[in-house]
Amino acid sequence: MTAVIDASHEKLGEWVYAYIVILKAELQVDEESPIRCSKGQLAAYEYPCRIIIHESLPMTATRKILQRELTEEMTPEV
């Protein structure tokens, strides 16, 4: 399960962040492998600058991801 959000950045405009939930415990995913994979397929402004691995994502009762809450917890690094 994934969610991709953008956060404002005072120098660059916006940064792209990807939240990943690993559903199978035996899978080992580091933060750099999805970035390396997406760099070959996406333009520089499209691939995420940071991957955040979570155990779960905030959801509504109908199982929609609450991206608003993810955006609020993200503080851009300058």
Image: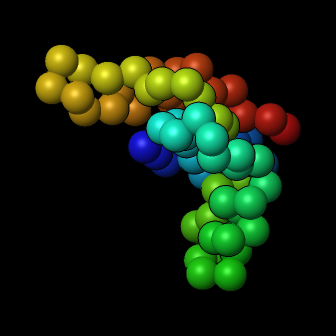
Q: Of all residues shown, which one is farthest toward the front? A: 26
Quadrant of the snapshot with the C terminus: top right
Residue 17, percent from left and from top = 61, 45
Left or right: where 53 falls relative to 59: right
**Residue sitting nearer the eye, 3 or 22:** 22
User: From where the camera sits, is residue 3 visible?
Assistant: no
Rendered position, 61 above or below 12? above
Rendered residue at 57%/46% (across/down): 18
**Residue sitting nearer the eye, 17 or 34:** 34
Residue 25, percent from left and from top = 59, 35
Rendered residue at 64%/35% (across/down): 53
Rendered position, 17 above or below 39? above
Tally of numbered discs? 0
Quadrant of the snapshot with the N terminus: top left
Can you tell which quarter of the image residue 75 is in? top right
Residue 46, percent from left and from top = 58, 67
Residue 22, percent from left and from top = 54, 39
Q: Of all residues shown, which one is farthest toward the right? A: 78
Can you tell which quarter of the image residue 26 is in? top right
Q: How is the image coloured?
A: rainbow
Left or right: where 39 falls relative to 41: right
Rendered position, 13 above or below 53? below
User: From where the camera sits, is residue 67 visible?
Assistant: yes
Rendered position, 52 above or below 14? above
Left or right: where 19 falls relative to 31: left
Rendered residue at 58%/20% (across/down): 73
Can you tell which quarter of the image residue 38 is in? bottom right
Rendered residue at 80%/35% (across/down): 77
